[in-house]
Amino acid sequence: MRTGHFQETTGQLIALTDSPAVIGWTGVLIAGLLAAPLVVGNYELTLMVTVLIAVVGAVGLNLLTGTTGLISLGQAGFLAVGAYGNAVLMVDYGWPVWLSLPAGGVVSALISLLVGIPSLRLKGLYLAITTLAFSFIVSHVILYAEPITHGPNGIFVNGAKILGVNVQKGPALYYLTLFVAVCVVLMVLNMQRTRLGRGWLAIRDHDIAARAMGIDLTRYKLLAFVVSSFIVGIAGGLLSLQIRFINIDVFGLILSIEALAIIILGGMGSVAGAIMGAVFLTLLPEAIRIAFNLILTPGSAFYSTYVYEIRGVAYGAVIVAFLRFKPDGLIGLWRDARKYWSNWPLAY
Amino acid sequence: MDLFLLFVSTGLVIGASYGLIAMGFALVYKATGVVNFAHGELVMLTAYVAFSLTQAFDLSFIPLMLVTIPISMLIGLALERIFIRPMLGEPVFSIVMVTIGLAVILRGVTMMIWGPDPHNLTAGVTTRVIMIGHLPFYAAQLMSIAALAICTALAWAFLRFSRIGIAMRAVAAHETAALLVGISVKRIHAIAWALSAALAAVAGVLFAMNFKLAPDLWFQGLKSFPAVILGGLDAILGSAMAGLIIGLIENLSQGYIGQGLRETSGFIVIIVVLMVRPYGLFGDKDIERV
Amino acid sequence: MKHLAGAVIAALMGSAAMAADPGVTDTEIRIGDVNIMTGPASFIGRAVSIGSKIAADEINAAGGVNGRKITIVTEDDGYIPARSFQALTKLLEVDEIFALNGTSGTANVLAMMPLIEENNLPTIVSTAPNELVYDPVRPSVFTLGASYSDAFYAQLKYIHENTQPENPVYGLIRQDDDFGLAVEHGYERAVKDFGVKDGGIVRFKKGTSNFAAEMIQMRAAGVNVLANGGIISGAANILSEARKLGMPLESAQVWSEDMPLSVNLAAQAGYDYYVGDYVALTGDDYDAFVEKAKQYVTADDIAAMNRYTLVTYAALHAMAEAMGQCGQDLTRACTVENLRKLKDFEVGGIMAPISFDNDKQLSGTAIAVYQLDAASKTFTRKTDFADY
């Protein structure tokens, strides 16, 4: 029986994990994900790609909101900038996708400085509303900057190839998003255990205290904006590769809200939580659809009229219920389950 | 000059609508520290309730409001009791997220009850054009401006003179201290929601009378954010004023600059205001800046 | 490198061709419909479902397509392009549809386009006949309906030739997206062709409800012929502002304004506005259609019917005709080929006969101009179906 868990050096404290079990299971997960296209159907694969894109976006937002405590309701704006950056460079300027995808992220990061600087003085809900305003302004600019963005016509994003393989569909797209998602997760996990990451956490917990300890708030907050927007921009680029057509309708306000819901439901500030939240919320409509199909016969009168709206209501209800009964999110649920498992049969 | 006055007069009409909605936001924020993202949905829901009442009983405007406002207050109370009260003590942002979830629910429920078709809501008010000097108005537009004035006056009197209003200000100033002097914070929160729902009903009915009743009415909630920020999130009376200013800015920017700026100008104002005066024109200045 | 190797292997495995086209059994043909079933625009999705149901029931009652019954599978996209993509993926992979009839809005159908092309999925676009859909032409995509551009040109031409207002000044209010752009094309063509005075073009953002400033500008420019690019409550609010400002106006409107729910809103302003539409809104053929519909759908559905019901009905019949010509050996390629050959296919007079045998695979471009009588909320037909 384990009696306790002791760490004796700084190295041990900041290591990603010291548990062979975690390393083992992560290996199993990665192997499973790599093998997935051999097992699952095309639709499931598309869903998995959507989930992975959501993971990238959620990890990015989590860095800003969960880790640094800067709340953003403007994710749709950053996604749009990243997607348009990727699409314009790839389609109009003929850049290869391995260059245009990160370049979209860079554009998004640069734009984030524009929001970041005025936002430095704000926090909490004020910042949330500023970023919301930002996403409205982005959509306006995209619509009116026709020579660059094709304005209302939108852009078809076709022919992205890496080493001659079309990476916009099927397993190739899946492996590309998986690769990006794993890179992003590793990057953020590692960033969080550096001086920078600890500085962000300090700002979240108490910014005045953080400053007193010598953390340059301006620089750290702006860095959080830049890194987070870079990641979210890449998620936008991946989205444009998946859907293969973007226009301004793709990046509605609903995306910003879903992004926030993902990290809150997953458990703020935790990368694992963001991942769980992304998986859960992206698959939730699917689960609700399947549940409804079990209860109701498709084609019945009730089904055709109300079911679509009820699905939407159920989505909202699950979010509310989760916040009500499990406010620390999925990651909290996971920690409880783990504690229960490792302590059983003791109470704690 | 005539053109300018026309822009101004119509700007005040839409501004009154923003002001009424913004007051509802500010009221809940002041008392509970939460931005209620479902307020726009509440505006829509109460307007639909009023619509059903006019269908069933053929009420004229004043009786309609007298029935709709109490019903809306009950809805506000119920929503607070079911969704918000259990979250007391949770981080503010979890509660805000609950209101976002609530917004999704209310939108779906409204669609399920009333369907997607848009409607006219006249509430027995004449649709003839009324001339004031050279400026034409519809009766409902003048009522909008009047309603904003009345609600502002009532809100001022309520906060200044009534026991509950003073208690509400105490809760806003310091929740724990208010609790210590014997104010039931829970009750104040509930009252804030009920009053905000009453404001939502006034705003919703008048908006629907002026701009039709459709299931996208909830979006006016977001459109009113510039007014809330300009006024200051916690400034109830300031929000009313700021609503008018935003209405004017929107109309004048559309009128003289164009390029679809109307829908964006308000949000540009938000960014500028937050850079220069983050607590808004009328808000409390103790917002931390680090 | 490991990922790439995996990708190559998986791609090779996935490309093993399947023997028969999905969605067809000996007794059934599955037709997909991605539409707006939630949110403020869901009256479109509902009307489309009703049209599909009437057509499918009618075809099935007459023995189906060579003995195979048509089944409609509807998926909601809530008017969001990313969801349209997901919805069509689901229809293709899970429900295994054979063809697609019902494609939501313009951005939505464009988001589905890569999937449609990849699967050579026979598709008739009837609710968003935007130029972006048929230019460039996609081999398996057929468009049923006139462009917004032609619809406005037709109305302005009618106004120009018949009502002849004194000192005509034209003006346009349009949405600042792809749809608005199409409207503007029609407007500019009209202004140039008729040599009339252009009072100006104003753009607004989707979802705008306050049009006061726009109409003040229109009045200041002396506009008395308005191309009203607002939809539903937007169009009604534009007219309402015009009436307040006391503007004498001939107003040309989007075809969505001929739906009963739009008329109810807009008639209040009292303008006898025009619409150009590619389906019949009045007349014996229309009445016959409603009578027929009553056999298959409920009274509620009849009340929720509108122009989108008619276009979907016509499109499904065209699809069934093409599938029927393939005989027992039904494939997507054969259906597409027969659609391409379709000529003068009659759909009970509810729109001009359908012919897809042109470069653009486009039909139903003939427009009739109607005028509203605001007092009685009824339309009268002013012109026959004609191309512009």
Image (cartoon, coloured by chain):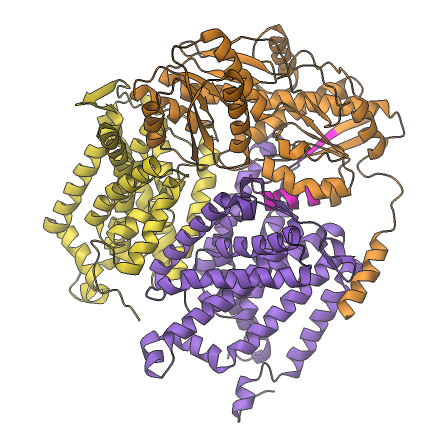
Question: Residue C151 appears in which quarter of the rendering?
Answer: top right
Residue name at image x 42 percent, y 54 percent: A134
Quick check: A65 above or below C18? below
Q: Chain B: what color?
A: yellow
Question: Residue A150 appears in which quarter of the rendering?
Answer: top right
Q: Residue furthest bottom?
A: A8
Instruction: Give the x, y percent position of residue C42.
Output: 53, 33
Quick check: A195 above or below B12? below
Q: Quadrant of the N terminus of chain A?
A: bottom right
Number of marks in the rendered image: 0
Residue C81 covered by magenta stretch: yes
Q: Residue furthest front?
A: C195
Q: Is residue A68 left or right of residue B178?
A: right
Quick check: A239 above or below C224? below
Instruction: Give the x, y percent position of residue A203.
Output: 39, 74
Q: Residue furthest left?
A: B161
Instruction: Give the x, y percent position of residue A128.
Output: 39, 58
State the residue in front, A43 or A1.
A43
Residue A120 covered by magenta stretch: no
Q: Chain C: what color?
A: orange
Question: Residue A3 appears in which quarter of the rendering?
Answer: bottom right
State the residue in front, A319 or A157.
A157
Q: Is residue B189 left or right of residue A158?
A: left
Q: Is residue A268 visible?
A: no
Q: Which chain is purple?
A: A
Q: Is residue B248 visible?
A: yes
- The residue segment tinted magenta is C71-91
Instruction: Give the x, y percent position of residue B1.
Output: 21, 30
